Amino acid sequence: MPFPIGSADDKTLSGLSSHRAETTMIRIELERAVAGNLIETLERRLEVIQALEKASGAIVVDEFEREKSAIVPTLIALEAALKLPPRQ
């Protein structure tokens, strides 16, 4: 049974529009197993980024920060959604 992993408004979705008059909502539903796999993949990617940051220093910091700023809230939303009881 799919479950919602959360939503985001236009304040968290950068680059969608230069005009922010309306709120943009996104709703995503995933199977629990798929969400679990996605969490594992994102956690591994975050570990790789952290290792690369240590190894490369400040060479590509902006790129790493941008990617981490997308991964971390996604992980938080997925983990929170998995704690919710399944919808009927």
Image (tube, rainbow, N blue to C red):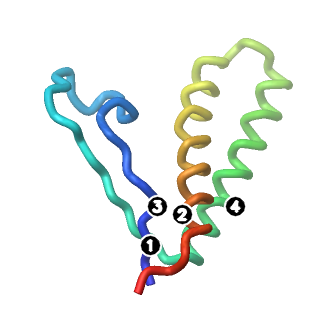
Which numbered disc covers residue 3?
A: 1
Say above or below: 77 vs 51. below
Q: Which residue is mark 3?
A: 5
Residue ID at (59%, 18%): 62
Marks 2 & 4, CB-CB < 8 Å contact: no
Q: Quadrant of residue 63?
A: top right
Q: Which residue is mark 4?
A: 40
Q: Earlier in the sequence, mark 2 or mark 3?
A: 3
SS class, disc 2: helix
Left or right: 80 as drawn, with respect to 1: right
Amino acid at the residue labelled 1? Phe
Amino acid at the residue labelled 4? Glu
Say above or below: 75 vs 58. below
Marks 2 & 1, CB-CB < 8 Å contact: yes
Marks 4 and 1, Cα distance to the nearest angstrom? 18 Å
**Image position, residue 17 (x, y; %):** 21, 28
